[in-house]
C-alpha cells in the first residue's frame, strides 16, 4: 500500500541510499510507502499499546484496594511522569542522534548516542533524589485530603526516586533501537516488562502486603529487568559487529545529549505538569471526580500510547532523512506520519467513548459506595476526552517530527506558554465554584470536572494547531 503523495523535485532519486519509507513512482519521483512506514511503526504501535496496558495494570491493581487508593494515584501519577520526563529527555534524545547517524551510515556514532544517553541518565540520578522531596509540599499546597495524600506518598517514593533513573536507563537503549529501525527489540523488552509487571504487582501488593507502594515497587522491578534484557541485546554479537556497541562507550557526548535532551524533556514535562495540576484540581473537587478522571485518562491511553508509537516512527524517519541531508523528504514523510497519528487517535477516541459504559466498570470496585457516581461521570468525561484525542494527535505527530529534525527549544517554549497561560488558569476558572479554588483573583464558574475537561480540550486545540504550524512552516530546516 503506497501513497500517491509525491515529494518536490529536489528529492528525486539520487545516487546512494534511497530516503527512508520511499518508493519511486513511474514518473521518477519519490512517493511515501505506507507499507514501509507501518513496517517500522508496527512494533512501536504494539509497544506503546503494551505501555498503556502497563498503566492500566497498575490502575486495575490499585483499584482493587479502594476508591481512595485510585484517587491517590490520580493525585500523584502525573507528578511522577512529569518529573521522570523532565529529566528523561536526555534518554529520548538518543533516538534523534542515533537516527541521524544511521541515516549517514555512521553506525558507531549511533551506538555512541546510546552510551551517551546512559551516561546522561546516570548523571541525572542526583536530581531525582533531590526532587523526590517535593511531592509532600505540593500535595499539601493542593489541599489533598490527608488519607489520600499519605497513600499517594507511599506510591511516590519508590516509583520516582528509584524508578525514575531506572526508566531513563531503559529508555536510552530503547531509543537506540528505535533510531536505527530495530523496533522489534524494543517491543520484546516491553512485552517482558508488561508480563513481569503484572506478576510483580500481585506479589508485592498482596503477596507481601505492601498495598499501593507494592504497585510502585512492582513497576521498578519490571523496569530493571527490561533494562538488563535491552543491554543483552545491545551488546549481542550482531550489534557489536555492526555498531561497535562494546567500544563506543569511551567518549560519551554528554554536552550534546543535555543540549537537545533538556529542552525535549521540558516540552513534555510542561505538558504533563499541566495535566498533573489539572488532576490535582479535580481530585480536590472530590474522590469521585479524581477517580473518574484517572480511569478516563488510563482508558484514553489506549489511543494515546499507540499514537505515540506512530509518532516515534516519525522521529526515526525524519531523523534518518536529516542524516541523509534530504530535508524535503523529511517534510514529506513527517507530514504523512502526522496524518496517520490523527486518523488513529481520533478513531480510537470515538470507539472508547462509545464503549465506556461497558469498559469503565472493570476499574471500579462494585462494593464501593461511590461506584455508581464514578461510572456515570466517566461516561460524561469520555466524550470530551475523545475530542481531545484528535488535537492531541496533531500535537504528538508534529512534536515528534520536530524532535527528529532536532528542533526542541522553540516547541518547548510554546508548550510552556500554553500550559501556564491557557490550560492551568482556565481549568481553575471552569472547575471551581466561587471561594472553592486555590486563588480568588480569577473568575470561578463551578462546572466541576466537566468544566476542567473542557479547559483541557481548549488547551490541546491551541497546542496542536501551533505545533503543526511550526512543522509546516519549515522553521526546523537547517539554514544554508
Image: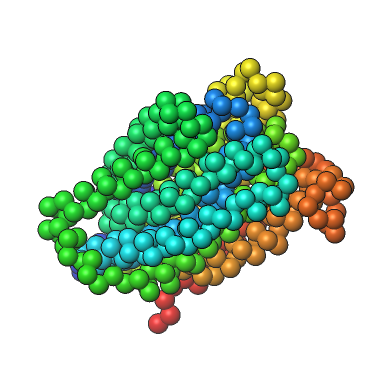
Above or below 1: residue 94: below
Residue situated in front as seen by the camera: 181 or 227: 227
Percent x, y of residue 187: 32, 42
The answer to which quarter of the image holds residue 217 is top left
Above or below 290: residue 231: below
Instruction: Answer yes or no: is residue 230 visible.
Output: yes
Percent x, y of residue 478: 42, 76
Instruction: Answer yes or no: is residue 403 visible.
Output: no
Q: In which quarter of the image is the N terminus?
A: top left
Rendered residue at 62%/18% (across/down): 366
Extreme residue in the right direction: 434
Rendered residue at 36%/40% (across/down): 222
Percent x, y of residue 90: 41, 63
Q: In the rendered view, does 397 fall on the left or right side of 33?
A: right
Q: In the rendered view, does 30 fall on the left or right side of 474?
A: left
The answer to which quarter of the image holds residue 239 is bottom left
Above or below 67: residue 334: below
Rendered residue at 53%/46% (across/down): 156
Percent x, y of residue 473: 53, 69
Q: In which quarter of the image is the C terminus?
A: bottom left
Amino acid at each position: 500500500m503506497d501513497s500517491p503523495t509525491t515529494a518536490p523535485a529536489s528529492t528525486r532519486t539520487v545516487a546512494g541510499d534511497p530516503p527512508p519509507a520511499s518508493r519511486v513512482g513511474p514518473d521518477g519521483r519519490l512517493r511515501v510507502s505506507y507499507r514501509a512506514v507501518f513496517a517500522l511503526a508496527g512494533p512501536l504501535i504494539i509497544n506503546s499499546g503494551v505501555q498503556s496496558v502497563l498503566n492500566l495494570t497498575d490502575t486495575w491493581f490499585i483499584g482493587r484496594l479502594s476508591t481512595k487508593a485510585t484517587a491517590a494515584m490520580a493525585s500523584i501519577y502525573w507528578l511522577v511522569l512529569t518529573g521522570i520526563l523532565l529529566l528523561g529527555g536526555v534518554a529520548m534524545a538518543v533516538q534523534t542522534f542515533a537516527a541521524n547517524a544511521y541515516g549517514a551510515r555512521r553506525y558507531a556514532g549511533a551506538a555512541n548516542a546510546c552510551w551517551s544517553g546512559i551516561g546522561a541518565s546516570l548523571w541525572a540520578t542526583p536530581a531525582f533524589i533531590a526532587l523526590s522531596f517535593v511531592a509532600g509540599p505540593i500535595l499539601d499546597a493542593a489541599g489533598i485530603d490527608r488519607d489520600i495524600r499519605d497513600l499517594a506518598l507511599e506510591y511516590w517514593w519508590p516509583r520516582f526516586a528509584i524508578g525514575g533513573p531506572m526508566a531513563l536507563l531503559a529508555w536510552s537503549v530503547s531509543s537506540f533501537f528505535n533510531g536505527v529501525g530495530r523496533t522489534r527489540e524494543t517491543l520484546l523488552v516491553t512485552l517482558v516488562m508488561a508480563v513481569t509487571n503484572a506478576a510483580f504487582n500481585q506479589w508485592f501488593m498482596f503477596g507481601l502486603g505492601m498495598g499501593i507502594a507494592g504497585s510502585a515497587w512492582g513497576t521498578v522491578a519490571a523496569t530493571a529487568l527490561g533494562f538488563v534484557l535491552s543491554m543483552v541485546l545491545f551488546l549481542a554479537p550482531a550489534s557489536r559487529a555492526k555498531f561497535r556497541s562494546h567500544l563506543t562507550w569511551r567518549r560519551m557526548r554528554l554536552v550534546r545529549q543535555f543540549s537537545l535532551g533538556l529542552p525535549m524533556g521540558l516540552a513534555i514535562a510542561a505538558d504533563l505538569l499541566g495535566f498533573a495540576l489539572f488532576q490535582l484540581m479535580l481530585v480536590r473537587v472530590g474522590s469521585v471526580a479524581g477517580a473518574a478522571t484517572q480511569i478516563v485518562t488510563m482508558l484514553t491511553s489506549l489511543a494515546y500510547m499507540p499514537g505515540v508509537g506512530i509518532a516515534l516512527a516519525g522521529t526515526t524517519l525524519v531523523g534518518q532523512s536529516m542524516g541523509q541531508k534530504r530535508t524535503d523528504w523529511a517534510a514529506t514523510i513527517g507530514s504523512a506520519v502526522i496524518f496517520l497519528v490523527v486518523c488513529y487517535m481520533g478513531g480510537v477516541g470515538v470507539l472508547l467513548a462509545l464503549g465506556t459504559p461497558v469498559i469503565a466498570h472493570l476499574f471500579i470496585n462494585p462494593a464501593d459506595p461511590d461506584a455508581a457516581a464514578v461510572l456515570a461521570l466517566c461516561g460524561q468525561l469520555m466524550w470530551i476526552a475523545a475530542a481531545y484525542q484528535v488535537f492531541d494527535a496533531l500535537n504528538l505527530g508534529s512534536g515528534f517530527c520536530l524532535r527528529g529534525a532536532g528542533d526542541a527549544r522553540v516547541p518547548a517554549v510554546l508548550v510552556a506558554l500554553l500550559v501556564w497561560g491557557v490550560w492551568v488558569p482556565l481549568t481553575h476558572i471552569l472547575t471551581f465554584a466561587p471561594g472553592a479554588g486555590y486563588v480568588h483573583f480569577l473568575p470561578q464558574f463551578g462546572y466541576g470536572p466537566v468544566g476542567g475537561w473542557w479547559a483541557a480540550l481548549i488547551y490541546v486545540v491551541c497546542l496542536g494547531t501551533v505545533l503543526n504550524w511550526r512543522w509546516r512552516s519549515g522553521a526546523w530546516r537547517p539554514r544554508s
